[in-house]
Image (cartoon, helix red, strand yellow):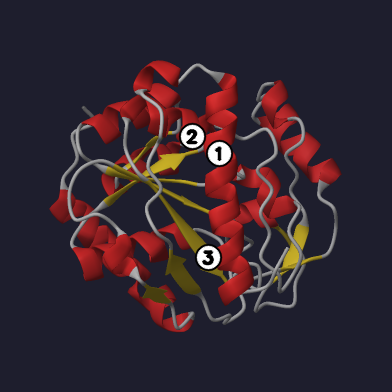
Amino acid sequence: MFPFDIQMGSRILRFWKFRQIYHRAAIAFENKIPADGGVLLVSNHGRLDFDMFILIKLIFDSCGRFVRIMADRIWFKLPVFRAIFPLIGAVEGTRSNAVALLRSGQVVLTYPGGVPEIMASRFGREHISWSGRTGFARVAIEAQVPVVPIASIGVNNGFIFLTSGKLLGYLLYRGLFRMGPSYHSYRDPLVIGVLPIPLPFSTAVHFPLPCKVRYVVGDPIRPTVGSERANDDVAVQEFADRIALALQQLVIQYGNPA
């Protein structure tokens, strides 16, 4: 399932060494990530572009486990990213893909808040917005794997948002890419990074501010119900709430409450 060359992936990750140094990135309590077996990592999203690659590099360097990324399907519509993302272990973020990887003993990373969480963030403050986002909990119950929350601290300090991005988001997601209704709330604000020039956040050609980034790993949280409850909305919501609360507590303890 999803054949992947770890050596190739690790070579590509070396390109993020500069970003790791630039952001003085560090990870704490990484020993809480199980050494083997399927594991679902969940974290808060932020304004720092592609910081998930910094995170998976830190985990690979410290734990020796290569993290597979659940990526938004929009990346697989873009020719360059469609070619590169699989080389670094990313797969389209569907429930079936996640379950298959977890059942095969992989470490999988997902951001339940998605792009809307990024757009709703505030500069200098961590933000968790998982309302209605329970897919990650459903996947963990179905695959019967632990969920490890990771607080991403400092990831909202990379860019300053100048606009709401509503108009650009409409033109990009509904106009250019013709994405479905689930993308209608996606936005694309004008932002400023190191270069004092307003550019669309989606262009990824600007460079972020030299913000310090820390990743704090929490305790594994295991499903308390069997896989047959994966379609039980009440059980899934309760599990999702437990995980969201654990992540929020990490953010409050080590970063800024949202």
Q: Which residue is mark 2?
A: 137
User: Three-letter amino acid code at disc 2?
Assistant: Ala
- The residue mark sitting in front, 2 or 3, is 2
Q: Going 17% across and 49% down the picture, which residue do you hit? A: 36
Q: CA distance from mark 1 to mark 3?
A: 18 Å
The residue at which mark 3 appears reads as 152
- 123 shown above or below 9: below
- Residue count near mark 1 (Cα–Cα under 10 Å), binned few <14, some 14–19, many ≥20: many
Percent of width and height locating residue 243: 52, 47
The reply to whether discs 2 and 3 touch (Cβ–Cβ < 8 Å) is no
Amino acid type shown at disc 3: Ser
Q: Are marks 1 and 2 in contact (CB under 8 Å)?
A: yes
User: Is any atom of residue 44 visible in this view?
Assistant: no
- The first of marks 2 and 3 along the sequence is 2
Screen quadrant of the N terminus: top left
Q: Secondary structure at mark 1?
A: helix
Of the numbered discs 1 and 3, the one sitting upstream in the chain is 3
Q: Residues within 10 Å of mark 2 (few under 14, many from 20)?
A: many
- The single residue placed furthest to the front in the displayed view is 224
How dense is the environment of label 3, judged by Cα within 10 Å: few (below 14), some, or many (20 and up)? many
Q: Which mark is residue 212?
A: none
Q: Position of residue 92 (x, y in %)?
A: 42, 32
Query: Residue 219 in the image: x percent, y percent?
Result: 39, 59
Q: Quadrant of residue 253?
A: bottom right
Question: Disc 1 marks which residue?
Answer: 240
